[in-house]
Image (tube, coloured by chain):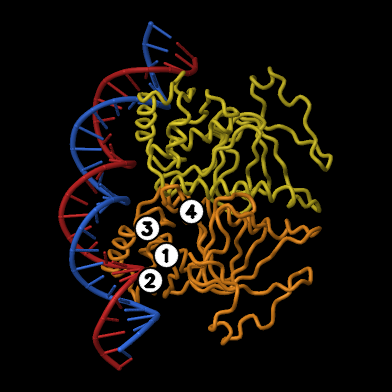
Chain colours: A orange, B yellow, C blue, D red
Amino acid sequence: MNAIVNIRTPFEILNGVAQQPDVSKDGRPVPLSFFHAGSEIYAQGEKVASHYQIEFGAVRIYRLLADGRRQITAFHLAGETFGFEADLAHHFFAEAIVTTGLRTFRPVAGLDRSRELLPLALRCMVRAQEHLLVVGRQTAIERIAAFLIDMADRQGELAQIELPMSRQDIGDYLGLTIETVSRVLSRLRDKGVLKFHGLRTLEIRKPETLRSLCE
Amino acid sequence: MNAIVNIRTPFEILNGVAQQPDVSKDGRPVPLSFFHAGSEIYAQGEKVASHYQIEFGAVRIYRLLADGRRQITAFHLAGETFGFEADLAHHFFAEAIVTTGLRTFRPVAGLDRSRELLPLALRCMVRAQEHLLVVGRQTAIERIAAFLIDMADRQGELAQIELPMSRQDIGDYLGLTIETVSRVLSRLRDKGVLKFHGLRTLEIRKPETLRSLCE
DNA sequence: CGCCATTTTGAGAAGTGTCAAGTACCGTGG
DNA sequence: CCACGGTACTTGACACTTCTCAAAATGGCG
């Protein structure tokens, strides 16, 4: 949870990211901002009337209870847009999970973006409501299965998937403890449904078994 | 879960509801539709590019799992607008909880309502994400407390509140069983926090106790 | 007044959380 | 390149909340 890092990391400079800033529809350039793993994009209580598009990396959106319990309401991956919640509710954090590059869209006076934003906001709402079904009515193994399928779908439906987030993040997203997440993943590994290639890289060996757990 | 009832019930005719239909911004009249308790407003799988405003009554929005488990994602009360989810996701039901009167807003070709709809959709999204924290990270008693405070706030912060929904509905909203809902309510009654005037009418005697349970 | 659905209450089971210890991974520095 | 240390993850034993199943009580409504 470090401070915002808005300068390029050596990695990105080396790779030439953002050497030619894109241009937004009203003609103003939209530069890339970089965030280190764990750094804050916007804080609970901040009024940020912007939205963000992820160029590379991953972001977690979450809320906190007074005693520190955390609920991650969404993960956003490369190519996705987020940041609507900041406009309205002053109770959400956004943090980079890994080194992340973002394009920030600030509101322009006199320019109404409702037409572009509405479909994105609706998709975000539906996603939250679908997630509610998972968290409210599914068992630990069903939640993990739903999560893995979602991640696989969003990574191009490949059998091998990358989980940029920690077990704690997964637990806080699914409403489970880190230990339960770990136990369920181990059980799926022992059953031959999953095969791990490193802690956060895994292969879905039996996607049909996983899917059958979701409904 | 009866069929759609689009005619006036004797009750409404007697009370003269909707004798003078309102008129929408584009000049077309927006008539009131009536729905009996339990009747379906739109079904999972239906493509309805409309939204609805509640004149009187109450509505539940929910999703189902294959085995019948239900998650209510939202309750909507008089004065509120809903129906965005139907545009996008084909997996939501909307039902009247009690006799309900709705104004239906159908999309008009060439008329862009994004500007009006975006704030409503955002509020809906934030509400779902806030609910996620309750369902994912709070105990049974905390969930009930949060629910009662929300209902009280939406009914004008009166001490006495009406719950139009059944215990089953409350359970399916909070991710609890009907028995747990009942037990928690009984415990709050025994502690003097709540006083019941009939099953679905109650008085919050110690709002501070209730609020202290939420954070 | 009596029926029927809804709600409440009880006892036991199951799933998940808590606490504690052990293991694996990964970046750092030698 | 390998040893080291710290963090993240896994595993185990047990506790506790919530669920399940069952039965009784309540209340609304004809």
- Sequence-first tag of 4 and 2: 4
- Mark 1, Cα crowd under 10 Å, few <14 / some 14-19 / many 20+, is many
Which quadrant would the C terminus of chain B be assigned to in this image? top left
Residue A173 quadrant = bottom left
Q: Residue B53 carries which label?
A: none
Residue denoted by label 3? A213
Task: Indicate the chain on which mark 1 is placed.
Answer: A
Q: Are marks 4 and 2 on the same chain?
A: yes
Which secondary structure lies at badge 4?
Answer: helix
Q: What element carries label 1?
A: helix
**Residue A84 drawn at (x, y percent):** 62, 56
Residue under pointer 2: A204
- Viewer-closest of B141 and B175: B141
Mark 4 touching mark 1, by CB under 8 A? no
Question: Residue type at mark 2?
Answer: Ile
Inter-mark Cα distance, 3 to 2: 14 Å
Q: Residue at x 55, y 80 (%)?
A: A9
Q: Where is residue C11 in the image (x, y as percent from the top left)?
A: 19, 32
The answer to whether marks 4 and 2 mark residues whose Cβ atoms lie closer than 8 Å is no
Numbered disc 3: secondary structure = loop
Q: For this rendering, which residue is in front, A3 or D27?
A: A3
Q: Distance between the residues labelled 1 and 2?
A: 9 Å
Residue under circle 4? A131
Could you confirm whether marks 1 and 3 are on the same chain? yes
Could you say which disc has been placed on residue A148 in the image? 1
